[in-house]
Amino acid sequence: MQSAVVTRREAGRREARQIHGLLLVYLVISWSVGLVWSSDAPGDTVERLTLFQLDPVKKGYVRELEAEPGKVLHVETKALEPPLFEIREFLTPEECAYIIEQALREGLYPSGVNDDAYYKAPANGEQEDEGHDSPAGEMDTEDERRHADSVFGDLDVNDDMFLDTEEILSVLNTDNAFLRHRDVLQMYSDLGLDPDSDGRLTLEEFLSLVFSDRLADIERWVWRQTGHGENKIRESKQAWLGQPGPATDPVLAALQRRVVSLTRLPEKIVQWSEQLQVVRYETGGHFHAHYDSNELDDMECMVNGVSGRFCRFMTILYYLDDDVSGGETAFPIADNETYSDRATKTEIYDLSDHCHDANLVIKPERGKAILWYNHYVNESTGWLGDLNLFSLHGGCEVLKGTKWIANNWIWVDDSYERQMEYLSNVQRALEEQKKTKAAMGLSVPRDVASGLDILKDLFGVFKPKTDTCSIVDEL
């Protein structure tokens, strides 16, 4: 058991290392987008970049895209919120087969959500009792009683003086466990938490479990459920292909060029985003509803592959096979009139039992791509804006067969100034590298140095943040 836990933890950390190249998203080389570096020419000015976003126009609207000479694709709007587009035959059958083959060669490992939280089990006998040695139901202090009353009030969203299963799920469901109403009722039965068996907790029942050893029992019970696939947020395996930067593999290089044509973003932003993630879902595999990016806050974007928050401006998902039953991609609240009227219910996140209750469901089709924006563009700055809450999405349960997809995440820092600072640092590192090579009589590349050389330089430029949380995989 312990070796399995260590193996899964190492898999998660391996994934974190795979995306260390995220810091290089800031490598928007000046000649690609019209930037002028003022350090060498004091009189020059720097053109301010803005992010391009495809206009959805209306649902069903179709625009033509010349992905490459002689290849015209049709981009159909599937939703307005978030702006979401479907492009059939974006990849050829041969390209799909090649990407799957490369993923198998690279080696697949279990997909995680959060390394430490996901793989740390509460061991028997290791629970601290926090000083609560009193018999069940006996209050230690009036302050503790008032605090517990306050917690009950916070959980009792509808103010009916009961905690129903929906309200209990709000604290039981973590980043890694996905429980349903029936699971809460089963927990009540297994642990004897609901003496009158009415499916609700009164204030006194709540206080009884708080001021006893039952919280430890609940934690252990919940953790045991995460061993079952249906109670995991995510059940799949994955691999990462290529290295950050301009792809050297001809298929991945062609894919990068196609993405640049589709998104109309600077080439270097596309090239220096995350590597291509390939995911395999077997029967029973799923990924319950989640967001690919994080809301804007004081935490900086991830710059070392370990700490920080995700800043994924957009997602492009490719279907690599369609010999599968189930496995749709669902957007539970796409084009909802409001965000809050449905987004608080557990059912909309459950893509095993409630896949087809989603507002938008897209079936796998080999070679098809779907593109959506995880963030708005800030109208004032033209740069990365707030998280689009309507971008909630996930993978429905595979009923039969195997589902293969690949993900392209386009990474943009929400701080324009910070991105420009990184640009300057990268440019300086590249110039120093050129000078060093010239002094040694080595040839200097015309455009961008190799990815490994750039990584070597930049690890001395960027310092990892130690005061931010660890995020291993997509939300």
Image: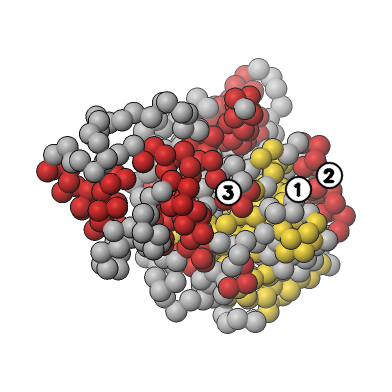
Secondary structure state at the residue bearing disc 1: helix
Extreme residue toward the front, this view: 196
**Side (left or right) of 426 relative to 216:** right
The residue at the point 70 percent across, 54 percent down is: 284
- Who comes first in sequence, dot 3 or dot 1? 3
The residue at the point 51 percent across, 65 percent down is: 347
Judging depth in this view, the residue of 413 and 32 nearest the camera is 413
Mark 2 surroundings within 10 Å by alpha-carbon count, few (fewer than 14), some (14 through 19), many (20 or more)? few
Q: Which residue is mark 1?
A: 252
Q: Please count the marks in the image.
A: 3
Judging depth in this view, the residue of 445 and 140 nearest the camera is 140
- CA distance for labels 3 and 1: 31 Å
- CA distance for labels 3 and 2: 27 Å
Q: Which residue is mark 2?
A: 101
Task: Give the foreground label among 3 and 2.
Answer: 3
Q: Amino acid at mark 3?
A: Lys
